[in-house]
Amino acid sequence: MVATWPAVRHVNGNFLAGPAPDYGEQQSGDYLQLVWNYWLPGHQLEHGRNPFVDPYSFQTESDVRPNPQGWLLGVPFWPLERAFGLPWAYNLVLLLTFLAAGGFTCWWLRSLGLRRGPAVLGGVLFALAPYRIQQSTGHLLGQISFLLPAMLLALERRRFALAALALTAIPLSGQVHLALGAIPLFAADAWVRLPRWRGRVYALGGVLLAITAGELVQHLVIATSILSGGRSIGSVRHYSATVADFFTRSNGSGVEQFVFIGWVTPLIALAGIVVTWRAGRSKLATLLGVAAVLPMLLALGTHLPGYETAWHHFRPLRYPRVPERLMPIACLAIAALVAYAATRLRHVGLVAVLAVGLAADLHVRIFDATAAYTNDSTYDAIKGPGTLLELPIFRPDIDLGSVYLAYAIQSPRKRPEGYSTTAPQTADGWAKRHHGLSCGVGDVPTYIRFVAIHRGIYKRANYVGDRCPAAAEAMLRRQGFHLLARSGPISTWQAPWPATP
């Protein structure tokens, strides 16, 4: 509630997400990709189909794509969506991830021997970590970060199978960059905390399983995508944080560069290293210290001397364009170190006062209430089978195309478009070839039966005036399309001929 305040007051009929301009239709944002991917597995199961694929996006020229983002949180989303509707389901899953992040962290710290007060403090701090909150507004990275303390908890309690599953779930959810840090963290924690070789061998099995999962995602998703060649060092430079960003409460530098860690919290974390060391846990103090500092150094990207050299020689670094994606590990380590520092406070009331003070130190106002357009009359007018084209056309990694995913839930059918940074190369080629349709240039392919024109997205994309949407409608009339419905900024059209396969 604290992390999403004040947006959570307006949760009914809205999505909890980052702020975006409203032009009379669904606001764009990465959160819509999550809504779509969470909704899809349940929809597929209800129709007796494979729940791990997306049969609608980037069709018909591309192969059916896996849906790694949806399988984990899609499990609670499915019954919640059926019981409470789409916006409530997404918001409840989002809020549950905060509870899971704090709860697993508290449980893990308790398993390390901390008293209840300091353990709860550590859970609160990880749940309220500003970077985790920012990423939870629309990126799966923030929402599944609870898997980090979950795997450490299972490892500490010698539940090796559960530990391996929690670790493997990170790359299987498509979060391969986070896995690059989670796997070494898992291995190092096993080495430090497991006293016998047998346990370390079991932990090694979990590491190998996670690496295999990462390779599987690489082969099935990344290898044939627009990301197959990796990112340019220029894009990495664009998203690299600066030292000042770690102490800047606003995200004026950009969403991805937002790495605020508080002003007082890191100082108490430094004290936590000393307390942990003096308590006879030097190995654990070293592990938590490295886990806190190393992701922050890597978040500096090209601002860190030697990063470009590592980027050129360590191939996995070439794929993520955002070097900050390891920050959840630093957030967890900082929370644990603060919890250890709080063990020096003998009265639970003092721990509670510290918790309130540090919550204020970390507080950021990021979430907004974004209106949910779940029952659009123009999409209700689309009847029968057929492929749908939505205008304007965007390349598949441009987030403005995320708007169409919201309406795809209302009218699930094949679309040549979609939104994904790992979209197939064929989808990117299709968008380039047919981009002129956005301004009425060219002919709509004969396999397209329906077309939807979004004038609000034209404005959001800075198309000048109404010339392009008007030209697109004139093009449709020339080709014999007839208007199905018009409501606000959206109109839908149907071809005069049956669509050819």
Image (cartoon, rainbow, N blue to C red):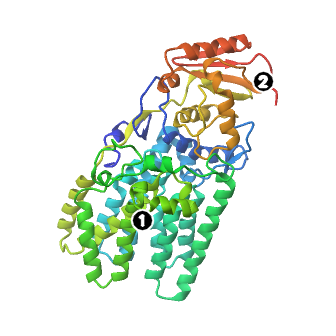
* Depth check, front residue: 378 or 280: 280
Estimate how packed mark 1 is, as few (under 14), some (14 to 19) or many (20 or more) residues with alpha carbons within 10 Å. Answer: many
Which image quarter is the C terminus in? top right
Give percent across and percent down for residue 263. Answer: 23, 57
Question: Which secondary structure lies at badge 1?
Answer: helix
Give percent across and percent down for residue 241. Answer: 38, 52
Residue 206 lies in what quarter of the image?
bottom right
Rendered view: 304 above or below 202: above
The residue lying furthest to the bottom in this view is: 196
Describe residue 444's horizontal placement relative to residue 407 as left or right: right
Give percent across and percent down for residue 161. Answer: 57, 74
Mark 2 = which residue? 446
> Mark 2 and mark 1: span between their CA atoms?
53 Å
Mark 1 = which residue? 104
Q: Amino acid at mark 2?
A: Thr
Residue 398 lies in what quarter of the image?
top right
- Circle 2/circle 1 CB separation < 8 Å: no
Rendered view: 490 above or below 177: above
Mark 2 or 1 closer to N-term?
Answer: 1
- Residue 56 visible within the image: no
Query: Which mark, by number, is residue 293?
Result: none
Seen at 71% across and 15% down, the residue is 481
